Amino acid sequence: MTATSVLVTQRPSRLGRAGRNAKPRLPWAHPTVYFVALIAVGLMLAPIAYIITGGFRTNAQITTDPSGFPSPWVVSNYLDVLTGDVFWRLVGNSTIVALATTAGTVALALMAAYVLARYRFAGRGVLYAFFAAGLMFPLTVAITPLYIVVRSLGLMNSLGGVILPQIAFALPTTIIILVPFLRAIPDEIEEAAFIDGCSRIGFFWRMVLPLSLPGVITTGILAFIGSWNGYLLPLFILNDASAFTLPLGVQSFASQYSVDTAKVLAFTSLSMIPALIFFSLFERRIVGGLTGAVKG
């Protein structure tokens, strides 16, 4: 028996032993997987469902049976919140802050990411690492010096004092996501544009911006949601109730109407609806943009 025949005869036995020792994987279509996923979804949705249904109850119903369903259903709590001016003022302030933060973040990050992705210069890697290090610098660490800077600039108790720091803290994530999109643009397109007489600024507006639109939309959505849900920074910067954003206004409303639990639940559930709708509409954009960033 030759060496080749020995190897041929021994190879199936090794594969057989490896196959017997390998643990079978659980298929994704297995009922256990769906059961675990259903439990996870239920644990996440249960608090939201409790808040929404709690707004349709009276304080007496909540006191008697905290975990029960409304019987009867009461819509006066939601109507009182929607017909009042407090809720809409908070929504307006949050909209202004979120839109301004999104526009400033995307504009500045797109220009910075374009330079980092398309130009070669000394210190480019250090500059990119500097922005990447910003991901490890949380707002809670910088809140005290940031408060001093905002107060020195005279931006206390104003929406501008919230917008500018939010732009600064959203830039690292936005730049890290946009750089792969801009780097993936072929150099041949840039060379052809320059041959046709297109300037660098013209190439940026006519070619770079449309080609990187998925990343721009993704980063814009993330910046908008992050600004809309921001609580710590407005808590330190804003003192006047007329300038409160929605998360800060929910806390203030809950403190003011602490004895009216049903109205507080109605106010809280209404404050969650804009962010939930916005995220649901653009969920595929977020996933597609992040996937493109990873591939790039």
Image: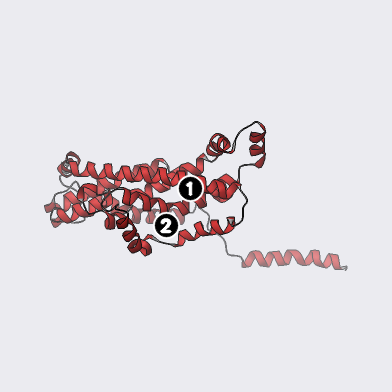
Residue 46 percent across, percent down from the top left:
30, 54
Residue 241 percent across, percent down from the top left:
20, 50
Residue located at (32% from left, 42% from top): 96
Residue 271 visible in image: yes
Residue 172 percent across, percent down from the top left:
47, 54
Please name the amino acid that badge 1 sits on.
Ala
Q: In this view, does 201 lie to the left or right of 104?
A: right
Q: Crowdedness of circle 2 by 10 Å Cα count: few (<14), some, many (20+)?
A: few
Q: In this view, does 19 lie to the left or right of 2?
A: left
Residue 179 percent across, percent down from the top left:
55, 49
Please name the amino acid that badge 2 sits on.
Val
Residue 52 visible in image: no
Q: Is residue 159 left or right of residue 64?
A: right
Q: Quadrant of the N terminus?
A: bottom right
Question: In front: 165, or 70?
Answer: 165
Task: Please name the residue that numbered disc 2 is placed on.
Answer: 36
Q: In this view, does 294 lie to the left or right of 86?
A: right
Q: In terms of image quadrants, where is residue 43? A: bottom left
Asked if residue 40 is positioned above or below residue 217 in the image, the reply reads below
Residue located at (46% from left, 43% from top): 107
Check the image and tell me how it is coloured. secondary structure
Give how far apart the Cα atoms at labels 1 and 2 are.
40 Å
- How many labels, in total? 2
User: Is disc 1 placed on a helix, strand or loop?
Assistant: helix
Task: Please name the residue that numbered disc 1 is placed on.
Answer: 109
Q: In terms of image quadrants, where is residue 277? A: top left
Does the CB distance between marks 1 and 2 fall below 8 Å?
no
